[in-house]
C-alpha cells in the first residue's frame, strides 16, 4: 500500500488521519510505503521502527520479524512517489509480467493538502492502481476530467 500524506491539522490534530489509516492498514496485514510530508508523522508515531511490528496483523508481523523491518517503510517525499512506479513494475516483472492493475497494490492520500498529491493520484489511476484521495481534489469543475478520473480509468 502506497500511503501519500501531507501534514495537516484538519479535524482533530496534526497527522491524526494519516497515522490512523496506517495503523489500520498494518493491522490488516498490509505493508505500507509511506511518502509525503506526513511520512514524518509515521516516524514520530513509531510506525517506521521494527518494534511497530507488534501493531501489525499476524501475517505482516511474521514477515517484519523475519526480515527485521518495520511495517511502515519510509519511501521519501511526495516528489519521490514516482519511484513507486519503478517498484511496482519490478514486482510485476518478477511475477512473470502480471499486469499492474492485477497486483495487490493500492494508493491512498487520506489527508492531502498540496496539489502535488492530486498529480500523484492521477498518475496512480493512469498506472491502473486502486486509488483513494481525501478530500476530493479540485477537479470537479471539468465534467470531462471528472468522467475520465472517476469512470473511464476504472476499465483501463
Image (tube, helix red, strand yellow):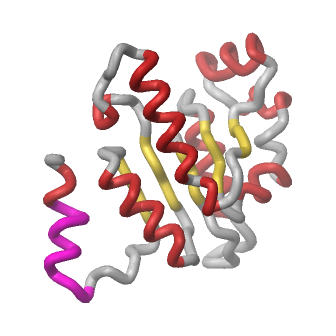
Magenta highlight range: 141-151
Is residue 143 on the magenta stretch? yes
Above or below: residue 29 compared with residue 144 = above
The furthest residue to the bottom = 141
Residue 152 or residue 11, whichever sits in front: 152
Question: Depth check: 96 or 59 in front?
Answer: 96
The relative height of residue 117 versus residue 48 in the rendered view (above or below) is below
Residue 85 rendering spot, x and y as whole percentages: 48, 43
Q: Count the numbered circles shown.
A: 0
Q: Residue at x 62, y 25 (%)?
A: 57
Query: x, y percentage for residue 113?
Result: 57, 76
Q: Nearer the viewer, residue 113 or 76?
A: 76
Residue pictured at 84% horizontal, 36% vertical: 49
Q: Is residue 40 above or below residue 155?
A: below
Q: Dominant secondary structure of the magenta stretch?
A: helix
Left or right: where does residue 75 sit relative to residue 112?
right
Residue at the image position 53 percent from the left and 52 percent from the top? 82
Q: Tell me which corner region of the image, top left, top right, bottom left or bottom right, holds residue 70.
A: top right
Q: Is residue 82 left or right of residue 80?
A: left
Residue 29, x across and y down, in percent: 56, 27
Is 100 above or below relative to 150? above
Amino acid at each position: 500500500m502506497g500511503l501519500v500524506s501531507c501534514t495537516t491539522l484538519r479535524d482533530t490534530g496534526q497527522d491524526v488521519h494519516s497515522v490512523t489509516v496506517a495503523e489500520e492498514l498494518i493491522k490488516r496485514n498490509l505493508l505500507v510505503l509511506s511518502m509525503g510530508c506526513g511520512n514524518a508523522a509515521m516516524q514520530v508515531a513509531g510506525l517506521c521502527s521494527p518494534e511497530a511490528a507488534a501493531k501489525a496483523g499476524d501475517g505482516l508481523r511474521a514477515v517484519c520479524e523475519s526480515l527485521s523491518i518495520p511495517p511502515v517503510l519510509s519511501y521519501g517525499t511526495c516528489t519521490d512517489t514516482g519511484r513507486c512506479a519503478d517498484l511496482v513494475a519490478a514486482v510485476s516483472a518478477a511475477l512473470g509480467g502480471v499486469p499492474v492493475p492485477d497486483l495487490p497494490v493500492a494508493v491512498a492520500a487520506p489527508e492531502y493538502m498540496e496539489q502535488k498529491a492530486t498529480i500523484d493520484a492521477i498518475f496512480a489511476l493512469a498506472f491502473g492502481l486502486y486509488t483513494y484521495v481525501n478530500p476530493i481534489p479540485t477537479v470537479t469543475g471539468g465534467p470531462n476530467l471528472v468522467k475520465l478520473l472517476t469512470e473511464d480509468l476504472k476499465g483501463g
